[in-house]
Image (tube, rainbow, N blue to C red):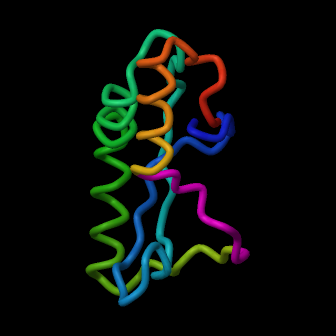
Amino acid sequence: MARGDADHVSATLLKADSGINTGPIFGFYTYPYDEIGESHVVIQNRVVLDNLDAIRDKLLEIDAGQALPIETVPKTSAEWGAAVAEQILALEAEGQKDQAPQ
């Protein structure tokens, strides 16, 4: 959402390793969210809560040693973090929200 990529808003189930978002991925979970009517907090909660059954099933598969990681292609992270959030807040304070980074 931070980069306008509405097709890839999801929760990712991955195995933590020593890197940042570099472990094997076991699932992606989403729902038909409303980017205008729902806050980012609601979307973050619902993307997990609306998928609890599927997430539980995948965790049971992992525990049983039956789950295989999803093949992925290395790509740049879309993580936007605090630096961009600070820019957005500063621009909003100046009344220039329309110039905030995407």
Residue 51 appears at what percent x and percent y? 36, 42
**Left or right position of 16 against 91:** left
Which residues are drawn in magenta?
73-81
Residue shown at the point (43%, 76%) measured from the top left = 20
Image-quadrant location for residue 13: bottom left
Q: Is residue 7 above or below residue 91?
A: below
Prevailing secondary structure class for the magenta stretch in the rendered image:
loop
**Left or right position of 65 against 95:** left
Magenta stretch containing residue 79, yes or no? yes
Residue 15 appears at what percent x and percent y? 37, 78
Residue shown at the point (41%, 16%) measured from the top left = 38
- Front one among 61 and 91: 91
Magenta stretch containing residue 6, yes or no? no
In the rendered image, which quarter contains the C terminus? top right
- Front one among 66 and 18: 18
Residue shown at the point (60%, 56%) measured from the top left = 78
Q: Is residue 71 above or below residue 89?
A: below
Image-quadrant location for residue 14: bottom left
Number of disc labels? 0
- Front one among 84 and 74: 84
Residue shown at the point (56%, 18%) measured from the top left = 97
Residue 90 appears at what percent x and percent y? 44, 29
- Front one among 33 and 58: 33
- Hey, which residue is sitting farthest front in the picture? 94
Image-quadrant location for residue 59: bottom left
**Left or right position of 101 against 69:** right
Residue 25 appears at what percent x and percent y? 50, 72
In the rendered image, which quarter contains the N terminus? top right
